[in-house]
């Protein structure tokens, strides 16, 4: 009897040892996986099947229970949920790769040199286009003039957009095509004059008078732009982007490229509020699948601080006669709000100045009435008067901010706002404390596409040179955990996508990024230089 029992136990042990493992597509092990789940725990290994996460645990557990042809030894590297940019201009970034790059030009002369070089490289172009100049980097910090462009390109239209997209320099030919003159007057825009004549600088809505004359990209050019943008985004660990302001034709193109499999970048599309777009999407209703979400409209409340288009409650500190301006009337903003509310769409409004923030927060309050789960958003929330901060909590409004704006603007923002009002600007910690959620993005191509730059700016409040030594208004810096949540699960939440992505959890999409060092522990001054070793979408390596 004793021998029979021993034989039975031996057979049982052998059977258990021979238990068949579950086949999966991919196993990663021997790493530190930040799940960014509710408890912010870490795991050692992960199993993926059919583009979804099926298991997380210790390396021993995963390797015991699962087998795959593709088994990746992480060799101690670090894994995070795929980074999400909560506010960018993905399509515009792609098209911008084909125009003159004026970013970082240290003078007007350097800007023009770059334009000339670009034209020499593309002599066949009907328009000369460029993007990225910033007069705040120049010695005199004055807006440029069209005079030299008129001399160089008397018969070719030129339009050079400022870094923030809220001002542009046009030459005489472009102004002529747009019908712009010293007498031009329009709501939410301005033609800069000198001695009674246009200097060529157009602010906010005035830009469209010229830009509408530029021929549309062909479908082939548009596809090329999207795929080029995708390639660069994957290289820095981005797997999802919120594209702030798209028309139906571009959303349709994105959907077709998704279906064809060539575009793998997941897109949360904020729709431009044109009559045609409103009519179509109100009839169709919100759209959501694994690759595309369309459930919001992007509204522009005001302009930018750098071009003095941001709407302020009190005059600009460095131009006492200027307050900036709203880009539409409060009455029209409110009509938009009720219309979006009734049709089940989020209202995501660009608000830079404290006047724009107050105007739109009060409109949101009248429409939303109380706490809710509609996830209306204020994009940028850059200068918010202390009396208005609590409205984010009272009406469940999500602040969608860009940490690198603070470190790009800190050199001159106090000149615009003065020593008191600057303290109410870029107040990310204060905004986070309202609802316990903040969505982080970059606003690229206004800023660099690399989300690690935003992570560094959020926690250190320093620029690429790690200046200033003690940080800029560090009372509003975020912790590392908060910053990582802001660029993953909280960004997903702001998009109504938290059940699909934003954390490494069973059942969610297998989008993740592998870094060589730990974001949670790496020295602050090295964060911008951490290397993305791999980016995965649907469990497949895309970089």
Image (cartoon, helix red, strand yellow):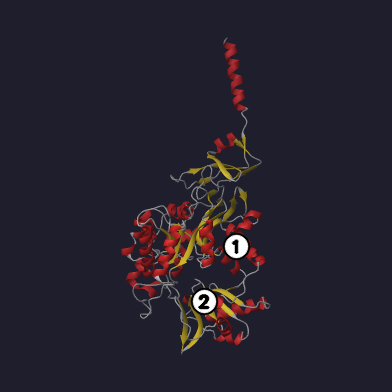
| Nearer to me, 354 or 375 | 375
Q: Is residue 473 above or below residue 543?
A: below
Q: Badges 1 and 2: C-beta atoms under 8 Å apart?
A: no
Q: Is residue 542 above or below residue 144?
A: above
Question: Does 169 sit left or right of 14 as displayed?
Answer: left
Look at the image and tell me in which quarter the N terminus lies: top right
Residue drawn at the location 53% of the way across and 45% of the way down: 508
| Nearer to me, 476 or 198 | 198
* Residue 329 location (% of width, % of height): 41, 72
* Residue 290 location (% of width, % of height): 56, 50
Q: Is residue 216 above or below residue 151?
A: above
Look at the image and tell me in which quarter the C terminus lies: bottom right
Specify the farthest residue to the bottom: 195
Q: Count the marks: how many?
A: 2
Calculate the distance from the C-alpha at mark 1 to the C-alpha at mark 2: 24 Å
Asked if residue 106 shows in the view, the reply is no
Q: From the viewer's perspective, is the residue at label 1 or at label 2 nearer?
A: 2
Label 1 CA crowd tier, 10 Å (few <14, some 14–19, many 20+): many
Q: Secondary structure at mark 1?
A: helix
Q: Is residue 358 above or below residue 307?
A: above
In the rendered structure, which disc, 1 or 2, sits on the residue that comes first in sequence?
2
Question: Does 452 sit left or right of 114 as displayed?
Answer: left
Asked if residue 377 shows in the view, the reply is yes
Displayed quadrant of residue 432: bottom left
Label 2 CA crowd tier, 10 Å (few <14, some 14–19, many 20+): many
Displayed quadrant of residue 413: bottom left
Q: Pointer 1: what residue?
A: 229
Q: Which mark is residue 207?
A: 2
């Amino acid at each position: 009897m004793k021998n029979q029992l021993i034989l039975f136990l031996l057979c049982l042990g052998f059977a258990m040892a021979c238990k068949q493992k579950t086949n999966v597509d991919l196993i990663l092990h021997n790493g530190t996986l930040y799940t960014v789940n509710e408890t912010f725990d870490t795991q050692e290994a992960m199993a993926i099947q059919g583009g979804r996460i099926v298991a997380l645990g210790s390396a021993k557990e995963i390797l015991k229970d699962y087998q795959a042809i593709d088994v990746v030894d992480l060799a101690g590297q670090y894994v995070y949920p795929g980074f999400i940019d909560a506010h960018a201009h993905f399509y515009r970034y792609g098209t911008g790769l084909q125009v003159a790059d004026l970013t970082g030009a240290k003078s007007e002369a350097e800007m023009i040199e770059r334009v000339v070089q670009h034209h020499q490289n593309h002599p066949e172009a009907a328009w000369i286009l460029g993007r990225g100049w910033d007069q705040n980097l120049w010695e005199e910090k004055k807006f440029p003039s069209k005079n030299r462009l008129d001399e160089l390109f008397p018969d070719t239209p030129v339009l050079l957009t400022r870094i923030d997209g809220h001002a542009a320099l046009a030459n005489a030919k472009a102004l002529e095509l747009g019908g712009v003159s010293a007498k031009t007057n329009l709501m939410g825009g301005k033609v800069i004059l000198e001695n009674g004549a246009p200097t060529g600088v157009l602010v906010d809505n005035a830009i469209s008078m010229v830009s509408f004359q530029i021929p549309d990209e062909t479908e082939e050019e548009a596809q090329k732009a999207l795929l080029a943008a995708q390639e660069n985004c994957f290289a820095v660990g981005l797997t999802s982007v919120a594209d702030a302001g798209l028309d139906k034709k571009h959303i349709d193109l994105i959907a077709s490229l998704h279906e064809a499999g060539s575009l793998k970048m997941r897109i949360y599309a904020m729709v431009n509020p044109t009559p045609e777009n409103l009519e179509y999407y109100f009839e169709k209703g919100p759209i959501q699948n694994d690759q595309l979400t369309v459930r919001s409209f992007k509204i522009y409340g005001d302009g930018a601080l750098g071009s003095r288009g941001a709407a302020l409650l009190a005059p600009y500190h460095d131009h006492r006669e200027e307050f900036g301006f709203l880009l539409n009337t409060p009455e029209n903003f409110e009509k938009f709000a009720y219309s979006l509310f009734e049709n089940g769409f989020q209202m995501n409004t660009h608000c830079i100045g404290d006047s724009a923030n107050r105007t739109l927060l009060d409109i949101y309050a009248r429409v939303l009435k109380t706490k809710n789960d509609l996830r209306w958003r204020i994009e940028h929330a850059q200068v918010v008067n202390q009396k208005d901060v609590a409205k984010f909590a009272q009406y469940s409004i999500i602040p969608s901010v860009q940490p690198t704006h603070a470190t790009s603007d800190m050199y001159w923002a106090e000149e615009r706002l003065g020593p008191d009002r600057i303290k109410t600007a870029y107040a990310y910690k204060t905004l986070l404390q309202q609802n316990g959620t903040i969505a982080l993005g970059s606003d690229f191509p206004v800023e660099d596409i690399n989300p690690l730059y935003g992570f560094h700016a959020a926690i250190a409040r320093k620029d690429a040179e790690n200046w200033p030594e003690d940080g800029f208004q560090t009372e509003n810096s975020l912790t590392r955990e908060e910053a990582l949540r802001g660029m993953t699960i909280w960004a997903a939440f702001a998009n109504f996508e938290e059940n699909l992505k934003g954390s490494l959890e069973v059942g969610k999409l297998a989008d993740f990024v592998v870094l060589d060092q730990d974001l949670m522990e790496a020295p602050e001054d090295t964060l911008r230089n951490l290397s993305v070793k791999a980016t995965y979408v649907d469990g497949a390596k895309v970089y």
